Amino acid sequence: MKTRNILLAGVVALFSLSAAAQVGAPYIHDPSTIMECDGKYYTFGTGGGGLISADGWVWESGAVRPGGGAAPDAIKIGDRYLVGYSATGGGLGGGHAGRILTMWNKTLDPNSPDFAYSDPIEVAHSEVDEDCDAIDIGFLMDPNGRLFCTFGTYFGNIRMVELDPATGARKEGAKDIDVAIDCEASSMMYQDGWYYLLGTHGTCCDGANSTYNIIVGRSRSPFGPFLDNVGRDMLQGGGKMVVAAEERRFGAGHFGRIVLEPGVEKMSFHWEADLDLSGRSTLAIRPIIWKNGWPEAGEIIQDGDYKILSRRRGYALELAVDFVRAAGGMRGFGRQANETVVKVENQKLEEVIGGWPEGEIAVRANDYMARPHQAWTIEAVPEAGGYLGGPWYKIVIQGTNRALAAVEGHELTTVPEFTGADEQLWRIDQLTDGTFRIAPKAIPGCHHPQKWCLYSVADSTPTLGKFDFNNDNAKWDIKAR
Amino acid sequence: MKTIFKTLSVAIGLALLMPGISGRAQVYADSSTQLDKYLVPVTTPTAAPDAQGFLGRWLLLEPISKPNRSNTVFVDSYIREVFGKEYFKGQLGDVLPKDGAKVKMTVEYQPPVNLQGGRPMGFGMEPPKYEEKKVTLKWHAYDSKMPNVKLFRFATNVTEDRYGVIFWAVTVVNCEEDIPNVRLAVGSNSASMWWVNGEEAVILSGDRRRVMDDCASQRLTLKKGRNVIWGAVINGPGMSDFCCRFIDEAGKPVKNITLSVQ
C-alpha cells in the first residue's frame, strides 16, 4: 500500500513538474531570446554554449556560442542570425569595464556546414569606473527596420544605442542614451505604437533566495523616456511587474519575446532556482498577455479539473448526452423564512454515467450547469513531449478516461479510453488576450493539422476550424472548477 | 450656410453613433398577429434565400398535438424517440407533399388554451391524462417574410393548437453545382431535428431559444440539383419558431441556391 502511494505521488509530481517547467536538461542562466532555425529552437546563456530543443519543450545542452562572457541575445535579420554578448562578466564589487560584441551566423545548427560565426565586433563599451557596466545586450528591430540594442547592469544606467541592421555594427554617429537606472538584463519590444523597455530588478544569482523579477516601462519613442503604469520614469527606478516568483520557482530574469503568430506570444527568461529541478537555474517560457497595453506573464495550464467555455457565446464544452435533472428543483415562489437551510449536493458522475453510451460520444456546447458531462480534467502527458512553452495534454471527462479527440473531416468526438494517440493530444496556448487556443496534435486524414483548433462553428457546435486570433470562434476560456 | 452644414454634420455624426440606426432600420413594435405579417402563400416556382442566407420557403404541416407542460423534457433521447415515429407517409422522403395535401392521424387531445389563464406550471404537478383524437392536418406552402419562420403564428392563425405541438417542415434546396463543405445552421424554439437528403444533419435538444446559428451540422455537400431538407420542431409552452441557413467554412451564408416546395 505504501509502495503504491509512493508511486502515485511520484506520478503526480512528474505531472506537476512537466506542466510547469521545461523538461529535459533546461539548465541555463541569462538565456538569449529563443530563436527558431530549421525546425529547432536555440537559446544561448552566460559563459558560452546554450540549449537546443526539437519541439520547444524538451531542452538539452548543445548550442554553440564562442566568446564566453555574459548574458547574450540573438535576433534573426533576413536569413542571418545576429548574436550579441558581453566580453566581460560584470560585477558589483570590482571594475566595470565592459564590451558589447556582435557576430553573425547563417545558421544556429552546429552540425550544419554553414555554421560559422563572423568575427565579433564591438558596438558599445563602458569604462572602468563610469555609471554603466556594458553587459547584458538586448536587441530590438522596430517596424521601421531600425535596429537598437540596450545594455547595462545595476551599476549605474541602462543604455541604448542604434545599430546598423546590415552590419550589426554601431550605426554611424549613434550615441549612447541612458534609458533606465539600476536594472539588469534589459530588452526592448514594440507593440501598437509603443516601445517597451524591460529590465530585471531584485537580487541575482542567489538560487532560491534570488528576488530577481522582470519589470517594464514604455515610451512612444525608442529613445524614451520609458514610464511605468503610474508615470514613473525608469531612469527614476520605475517599472511595472511582468513576471515574478511562483510557488516552486524563484528569480525571473532576462526577458526575451517570441511572436509565434498574431495573438500567440511567448516570453523566455530564466528561473534562478527551480525547486523541482534541484534548485538549479533553468529556462522558463510563459505566454505573454497584453492587458490595457501592458505585458504580463500568462499561465501554463496545470493538471486539474476545469470547465471549458467558448468565447463565442460562453457555453460550456460538454458531452452530447441526455440532460439529467439534478436535485434542487423549483421550490416555488414562497418565502418560508423559518425553514432549515440545507446544502444541496451537486449532481455526481455516478448518478448519470450509467445512462451514457459506451462508445464514442459527440461533443457540443451548452449552458454551463456544473454537471458531470461538462467537467473536464486536463493533464499533461509527459511521455508525449510538447511544443514551444507547453506539454501535450489529454482532455478527459473528470473521473473517467473518456478523451476528447479529433476525427477525420476536421470534426470532434470523445473516445471511451485515452490511448495516447496523437489525435487525442492537445496543445493549449494562452493567447495575448488571456483566452486559450486548444489545438490537436494530429487530425486523421489531415497532413497540416498545425493551423486547426477547437472552433465554435455555431453557439452550440464545436468543431475544428482554422485559428484566427481576431475571431472569438477560435478562442476558449479554461476555468478551474 | 455654415450653420446648416454644421447642423447636418452633427446630425449625420449622431446617426452614425446610434446603434439602432447605423446598422439597419429600426424595428417598430407591432401588436398585430395576423398570418400575412409572417407567412404568405407561395406564388412563384422558386425563391432565393434572404440577404443573410435564411431559407424562407417551406411546406409546413399543421401542428400535431403532443402535450408537454415543460420544454425541459426535450433531452436527446426523448426527441429522437418522438421524431423517430412515423406520422405520415413519405416522412423524410425525397418526394414532397403537395400544397394542400391532407394527413390523417391520431393525436393526444388537449382542450383549447385558456388565454385568460396563468402560466402553465411545469414542475411538481402530475401531468393530466390525455385522450386520443383522430385529426386531419393539412400541408401549407409558405414564404416567410422574416428570417425566422414563425411557427407559433402559423398555429394560432390556422389551427386551435398553439402549445404542446410538433411541427414538420420541408423544403427543397436547388443547386447548379455541388457545394461542398457547408453546414446547415439552425436556431429553433424549442427543440428540433433536421435532415438533409434523408440523413440526420443536426439536433437541437433541451429547452431552446430561437438563436441564429445556434447549432450546426457537420460539413456536408449540397449536391447539384435537388436537396431535400426536412425539419421537425417540438414545443411545450411558449413561442415556437425556427431559422435555418447554410453557411460555408468561413461562416458566411450560402446564397447561390434557390428554394422550392416541389
Image (cartoon, coloured by chain):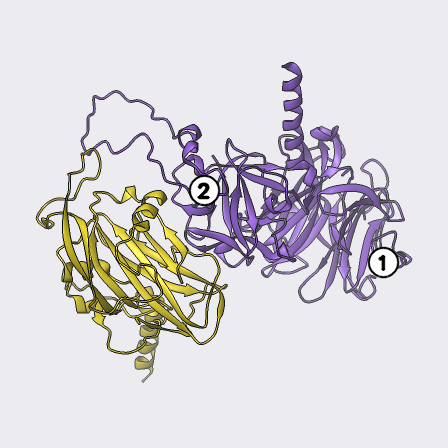
Residue at the far front: name it.
B89
Q: Residues within 10 Å of mark 1 (few under 14, many from 20)?
A: some
Q: How crowded is mark 2: few (under 14 residues within 10 Å), some or many (20 or more)?
A: many
Per the rendering, the mark at residue A319 is 2
* Kind of element beneath mark 2: strand
Mark 2 and mark 1, same subunit? yes
Residue at the far bottom: name it.
B1
* Quarter the N terminus of chain B occupies: bottom left
- Residue drawn 67% across the image and 32% down it: A17
- Residue drawn 78% across the image and 39% down it: A28
Q: In this view, does A135 lie to the left or right of B160?
A: right
Colour chosen for chain A: purple
Q: Mark 1 points at which residue?
A: A105
Q: Which amino acid is tagged 1?
A: Asn
Q: Position of residue A23 (x, y in %)?
A: 72, 37
Q: Do the residues labelled 2 and 1 touch (CB within 8 Å)?
A: no
Colour chosen for chain B: yellow
Camera-side residue of A416 and B215 = A416
